Amino acid sequence: MADAGAREKLRYSDEELKEFRAIILDKLEKAKNDLVLLTEAYTNADENGTNDTSPTFKVLEEGHQVMSKEENGKLAARQHKFITSLENALIRIENKTYGICRETGKLIPKERLRSVPHATLSIDAKMNQAPKK
């Protein structure tokens, strides 16, 4: 059949996966560093150290002079979830299933993966999952 030549690509090439792996490793390193800062901030919240003056916290603290331990704890939990998602993306790269939408089975566009390297859904699939109001 003529369809075979016109078929969509089923997975990213090893070279493309290598590019995504580098992006993920970079984001993973930054995320782990941020988690350390967040963890230090909520475990040392009563101290007058300089950890909470880092640029990361200046961005996070807009409108707040000091974050509570609870807020830092929530941010740390969210950061931990992000790290886990990035680590899972690395596993999908090793399995050569990275970048395949878990709903549609089609490739997630490179632009989306460069922005959200841990994505497992295409934009269309994600929009379809959103609760209708």
Image: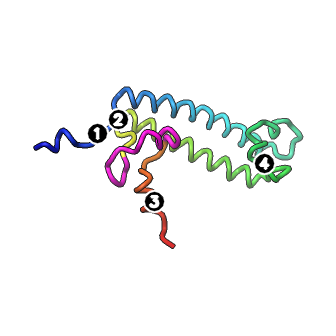
- What is the three-letter code of the residue carrying label 2? Tyr
Residue pointed to by mark 3: 127
The secondary structure that dominates the magenta segment is loop
Disc 4 versus disc 3: nearer the observer? 3
- Magenta stretch bounds: 101-117
Residue pointed to by mark 1: 9
Q: Residue furthest left?
A: 1
Label 3: which secondary element: helix
Q: Are marks 2 and 3 in contact (CB under 8 Å)?
A: no
- What is the three-letter code of the residue carrying label 1? Lys
Q: Earlier in the sequence, mark 2 or mark 4?
A: 2
Label 1: which secondary element: loop
Q: Residue furthest bottom?
A: 133
Q: Could you tell me how far apart the alpha carbons at marks 2 and 1 are, in whole angstroms?
A: 8 Å
Q: Nearer the viewer, residue 48 or 19?
A: 19
**Residue occupying the point 47% across, 46% down:** 119
Is 9 placed left or right of 129 in the picture?
Answer: left
Dot label at residue 61: 4
Local packing at callout 4 (Cα closer than 10 Å; few below 14, some 14-19, many 20+) is: some
